[in-house]
Image (tube, rainbow, N blue to C red):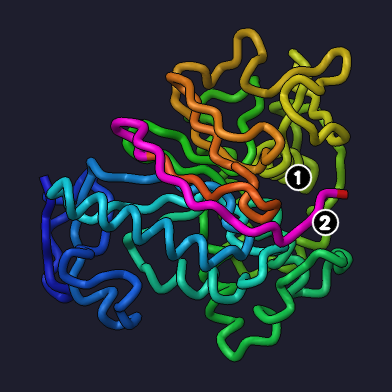
Amino acid sequence: MAIVVRVGHLPSPDATKGTALGLASAHIPYNAATPSQLFELITYSPMNTFVIGDLQGCQQQASELLQQIDALSAREGRAAATILLAGDLVNRGPQSLQALRHARALGPRLQAVLGNHDLHLLARSVGVGREHVSDTIAPILAAPDRTELLDWLRQRPLAYLHEGVLLVHAGVLPQWTCEQTLALAHEVETVLRGPDWGDFLREMYGNTPAIWHDDLRGTERLRCIINGLTRLRFCSQEGEIDFLTKEGADAARPGFMPWFEVPGRKSADTTIAFGHWSTLGLLLRENLIGLDTGCVWGGKLSAVRIDDRKLLQVACPQHRVPG
């Protein structure tokens, strides 16, 4: 069921409970709409949701992919798709500013989780961390609307549950259930959305502690949560994070394995969608949707629909060379 409303005439909370927001693109094509038009007509559509992998500033390819999604929705007679982004909206690609502006302009049609590159942008905005030669975030930091963009970004969640799918950027530590993941993410989100967010970012970086314990407190607790949700690829059966290995799933060092292969992983009963791991590539399993297909590295930008695993992809030019 889709509920269509005009702004200023929102339905009651009971009428929209459990639904997701989306733009009625049959009336307002996303690529032709002004920001004000994007909010003029809102469609609540719980059954047509696409998850998109790491954009990393590749806005041209994001636009092409969204055109494909809108065209497919129109052909099938579905309401406009809700869009979920698996983090790393910015950096390394050539249009980080445009990607961030466009994601924000899509309003309630879109939800995104924070990735490590998004957190890097927030940190650099308060003078924290070092600038990397591959960074393409300077135009955002110099933009006249930088405050609005950064405020929007730091309001994004680190974990998001939608239609039974848990969306994170990198992974989920094996000790965490779905419910615990959302609760722990909220601890960090509360700080990032608060008045002292800049102070926290000054303490964010680091590889310790490398293993989660429920009794962690303060900055160490928040850092471990962030590292698990935005940097995880390999870990041990006990949940110790391997920060060194960035190659594909078969490159695990002794004692480590892909986070989703850990026996007894407590989130195994929940479907998890994630990005971050371009050397892993597309991964579609019953309870896993891996979406980083290396757009910025000359691969593809991928979108998968939640309800039927429909795959849409756009080929990308190579903007960065590994190494």
Q: Are marks 1 and 2 in contact (CB under 8 Å)?
A: yes
Q: Nearer the viewer, residue 73 or 228?
A: 73
Q: Is residue 177 magenta?
A: no
Q: Is residue 202 visible?
A: yes
Task: Find numbered disc 2 in the image and state the secondary structure of the residue it sits on.
Answer: loop
Q: Which residue is mark 1?
A: 223
- Label 1 Cα crowd, 10 Å radius (few <14 / some 14-19 / many 20+): many
Compared with 260, 108 (above or below) is below
- Quarter residue 88 falls in: bottom right
- Give the residue drawn at x 27%, y 50%: 20
- Quarter residue 147 falls in: bottom right
Q: Which residue is mark 2?
A: 203
- Give the residue drawn at x 82%, y 56%: 203
Does 287 sit left or right of 318 as displayed? left
- Label 2 Cα crowd, 10 Å radius (few <14 / some 14-19 / many 20+): some
Give the residues drawn in magenta, as a range.
Answer: 305-322
* Secondary structure predominantly adopted by residues drawn in magenta: loop
